[in-house]
Amino acid sequence: MKNPELFSIGLNRECFSMVIFFKYILYALWHSWVCYFVGYYCLNQIGHNYLGHEVGLWMAGMIVYGICIFVANFQLAINFNVHTWHGIVMLWLGVIAYFLFYGLAALVFKGEINHLFEPTWAMPMTYVVTFFCVIQVFIFEKAYNNFSKIMKEKREEKEQFE
């Protein structure tokens, strides 16, 4: 209450508004579209893995699920303003948990997912698709930040002349 100017951004809706909310929704839809379609399309185009098994719903689905985890953790890492040791550990634990639980599920459960972990990560296309999806987050984030900076500078120039 001693510094009411600090609350002006909330009153002016500078940090949150319906426009900003829908920007985040579109941003999330973009990432989900890339993860889903690139993952399923690329992995199902190769047809078979090195053991001759068909790349099907379970294998492609588990890879897309892993890509979503990697993209989310990478997005968090990009948007952190301060990197502390426990924040970095938590990001890595998310990635490690994917591999741990996927490997355990492949060992324990019988049926479609039985022994699926090893062939999944033996395919080179798995790494290509994962790398592409994670890197597109970085490229899209940098492009969006640069575009936002340019637009902010243009608004400031316009306000100076008015």
Image (tube, helix red, strand yellow):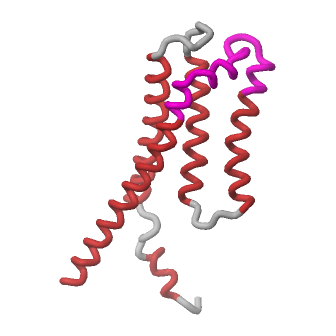
x 72%, y 40%: residue: 96
63 w.r.t. 82: above or below: above
The one nearer the camera, 28 or 60, is 60
Answer with the quarter of the image where residue 64 lies: top right
Name the spot of residue 65 as percent of width and height, x first: 59, 32
x 58%, y 54%: residue: 76
Q: How many marks?
A: 0
Name the spot of residue 30 as percent of width and height, x first: 41, 42
Name the spot of residue 104 as percent of width and height, x first: 78, 26
Residue 20 lies in the magenta stretch: no
- Image: magenta residue range: 103-130
The one nearer the camera, 110 or 51, is 51
Q: Among all residues in the image, which is located at the extreme top?
A: 52
Q: Is residue 104 left or right of residue 118?
A: right
Name the spot of residue 13 as percent of width and height, x first: 42, 70
11 w.r.t. 128: above or below: below
Q: Is residue 85 left or right of residue 146?
A: right
Q: Among all residues in the image, which is located at the extreme right?
A: 108
Question: In the rendered view of the protein, which quadrant contains the C terminus?
Answer: bottom left
Question: In the rendered view of the protein, which quadrant contains the N terminus?
Answer: bottom right
x 68%, y 18%: residue: 116
Residue 129 lies in the magenta stretch: yes
The prevailing secondary structure element of the residues shown in magenta is: helix
x 35%, y 63%: residue: 148
111 w.r.t. 129: above or below: above
